[in-house]
Image (spheres, coloured by chain):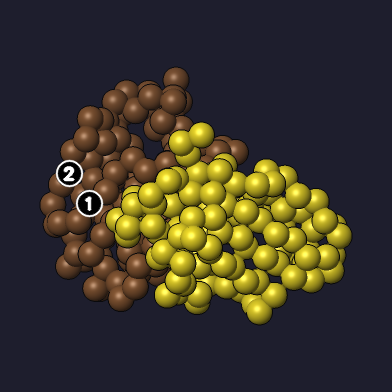
Chain colours: A yellow, B brown
Amino acid sequence: GAGVSQSPSNKVTEKGKDVELRCDPISGHTALYWYRQSLGQGLEFLIYFQGNSAPDKSGLPSDRFSAERTGGSVSTLTIQRTQQEDSAVYLCASSPQWTGELFFGEGSRLTVL
Amino acid sequence: QKEVEQNSGPLSVPEGAIASLNCTYSDRVSQSFFWYRQYSGKSPELIMSIYSNGDKEDGRFTAQLNKASQYVSLLIRDSQPSDSATYLCAVEGGSSYKLIFGSGTRLLVRP
């Protein structure tokens, strides 16, 4: 499809397990963002990529969170040793260069039991 | 102090009225400002961007920016029940390309 694609759409995991969330941005978009949205809350910035580099990792909540982007395209957000407070919807967005005009995927809903 | 502040609402207006949504931000060097709309259970979508002081109109939507007061607003004229959603204000993070979102204002348009 032409939009931002995220997978899985839903993930239920047990506390302590690792999870990987994938984002496939719109073709040609060089900027890619990850945000987290807890129930009824706003969007919490996690990380921003320009191409394959991440000039701003300041939003990652702890060292259990990491993200990478390869080939200037697909990005993976990895959460190690998941905790219940990690439960949220993880949203990926892309933009042609940096414009602030973001196109969001449908999100990956993570539930940690 | 939060970087981007919005009243959580809900803001309830009758159909056909003007809905006024407000946002303040803390970083004086921010240059780019955006309004996103998020329907329940859906992802945010961009509805307006504004970069210069003053008003910017697009159909029923008008964005207003006052950098001296660090204030952004969104007016929705002739509000429709389909406008019922959460409206998120987003501000460029000044010295970086980080886009900071407010917690959103829930708008309810009563038929």
Task: Establish if B13 lies above or below B74.
Answer: above
The label shown at residue B7 is none
Q: Is residue B32 visible?
A: yes
Task: Establish if A62 lies above or below B13.
Answer: below
Q: Position of residue B12 (x, y in %)?
A: 44, 36
Which one is nearer the viewer's eye here, B79 or A64? Answer: A64
Q: Is residue B90 visible?
A: no
Q: Position of residue A38 (x, y in %)?
A: 63, 56
Image quadrant in which the N terminus of chain B is located: bottom left
Q: Position of residue B14 (x, y in %)?
A: 39, 27
Residue annotated with mark 2? B56
In the rendered image, the residue lying farthest to the bottom is A63
Image quadrant in which the C terminus of chain B is located: top left
Please give left or right for residue A88 compared with residue B26 in the image. Answer: right
Between discs 1 and 2, the one toward the N terminus: 1
The residue that appears at 76% across and 49% down in the rendered structure is A11
The quarter holding residue B101 reads bottom left
Q: For mark 1, give the secondary structure.
A: strand
Please give left or right for residue A64 compared with residue A73 in the image. Answer: right
The quarter holding residue A18 reads bottom right
Residues marked 1 and 2, same chain: yes
How packed mark 1 is, by other alpha carbons closer than 10 Å (few <14, some 14-19, many 20 or more), is some
Task: Establish if A44 lies above or below B89.
Answer: below
- The answer to whether the residues at label 1 and label 2 have Cβ atoms under 8 Å apart is yes
Dot 1 amino acid type: Ile
Which one is nearer the viewer's eye here, A87 or A77? Answer: A77
Dot 2 amino acid type: Lys
Which one is nearer the viewer's eye here, A81 or B81? Answer: A81
Residue annotated with mark 1? B50
The residue that appears at 53% across and 63% down in the rendered structure is A70
Q: For mark 2, give the secondary structure.
A: strand
